[in-house]
Amino acid sequence: MTLYILRRLGLAVITLLVLSVIIFLAGQVVPGDPGRAILGPFASQSAVAALDHQLGADRPLITQYWSWISGAVHGDLGISYQYRTPVRPMLASALVNSAKLALFALILIIPLGILGGVIAALNAGRPVDRMISLTGLSAATVPEFVSGIVVIVIFADGLKLLPSSANAGPGATFPTQLRYLILPVIPLVFEFFGYIARMARAGTIEALESDYARTATLKGLPRRTVIFRHVLRNSLLPTIAVVATQIGYLIGGLVVVETLFTYHGVGLLIYNAAQQKDFPMLEAGVLTIGVIYLLATLLADLLSVWLNPRLRTGVTG
């Protein structure tokens, strides 16, 4: 197991290095000039050139990359072009906000998705199975901005039950914050319920048809015991991988939801940074999302090995 973890960590480091190069080069090819973006369209070219020199934007690309990545390794993410303040505190604050929204969404999505998938699998081919599968597939095909607008129109503008903005304001109590996050979470539940339910359904059906499930049934164990003790533990393996791949999206890919509900998270921060040509903020935000995604994937692999004895034997062997 130790060797397996070390191999996965080594692969994660290599992946991060490649990702950092891609992020840096992508930031360089984005149209726009940092000095011009900061000073505005009416600034003189000499002033823009002087600011570009001060920011280091006129240095060779390899020098700029090394300066950026070495600073990031030591926790220095640079200075925001747009706000003229260090990137790290702003990114940390936005990350906390996105984590709140993502955690609230996962608390709802995971149990609902797994429960729906298991119920569908236990009733495979029946109307209940078709209804759950069709509902999940239909909900997943609706873009977040469409479902977000619908819930705003119905629950905020029409019924006036919930606020249309996700920002509860400073000093808000925990129940108040949850109330403000209900509407933004609904489009996320619609988007991911179908994915998780389908994986849970497929995994449960495969586990029900496995040799160990048949053996447990032939031994006279009650069906409930077979399902909870033998089937679910193995059927959740593919579901764990799906959940892990969605965590990176929930943390950093909430651009549409955070913009629609004016929620100050990482997604909105990255979107604004791209609009304002704020390269330090943009690169730091995307790199942070990459780190979170890799950590989530690594955790999913470790959980899969822990849950599946056959995988654990292969790793230790």
Image: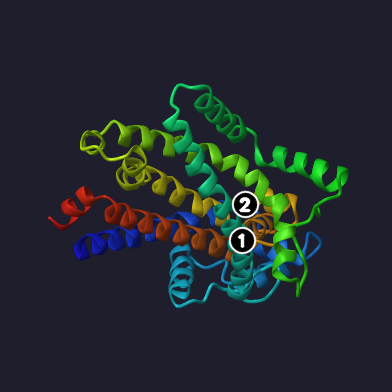
Q: Amino acid at mark 1?
A: Ser
Label 1–label 2 contact, CB within 8 A: yes
- Percent across and percent down for residue 69 are 45, 69
In the picture, the disc for residue 222 is none
Front residue (pair 313, 114): 114
Comparing 43 with 157, the one in front is 157
Residue 239: image x %, image y %?
Answer: 41, 44
Q: Is residue 234 above or below residue 14?
A: above
User: Which residue is pictured at 55% across the width and 41% down the height?
Assistant: 193
Q: Position of residue 10 (x, y in %)?
A: 28, 62
Q: Which mark is residue 98?
A: 1
Left or right: where does residue 259 sit relative to residue 52? right
Label 2 amino acid? Leu
Mark 1 Cα shell of 10 Å, populated few (<14), some (14-19), many (≥20): many
Q: Which quadrant would residue 153 be assigned to in this image?
A: top right
Q: Quadrant of the N terminus?
A: bottom left
- Is residue 263 at least partly visible in the picture? no
Which residue is labeled 2 in the image?
254
Q: Is residue 203 visible to the viewer in this orientation of the structure?
A: yes
Asked which secondary structure carries label 2, the reply is loop
Instruction: Give 228 or 258, whichever is nearer the viewer.
Output: 228
Query: Residue at coordinates 63% horizontally, 68% vertically from top-left?
Result: 52
The tag earlier along the polypeptide, 1 or 2, is 1
Total numbered badges shown on the rendered structure: 2
Give the x, y percent position of residue 263.
Answer: 71, 59
Task: Determine the residue positioned at 59% across, 30% down.
Answer: 135
Q: Secondary structure at mark 1?
A: helix
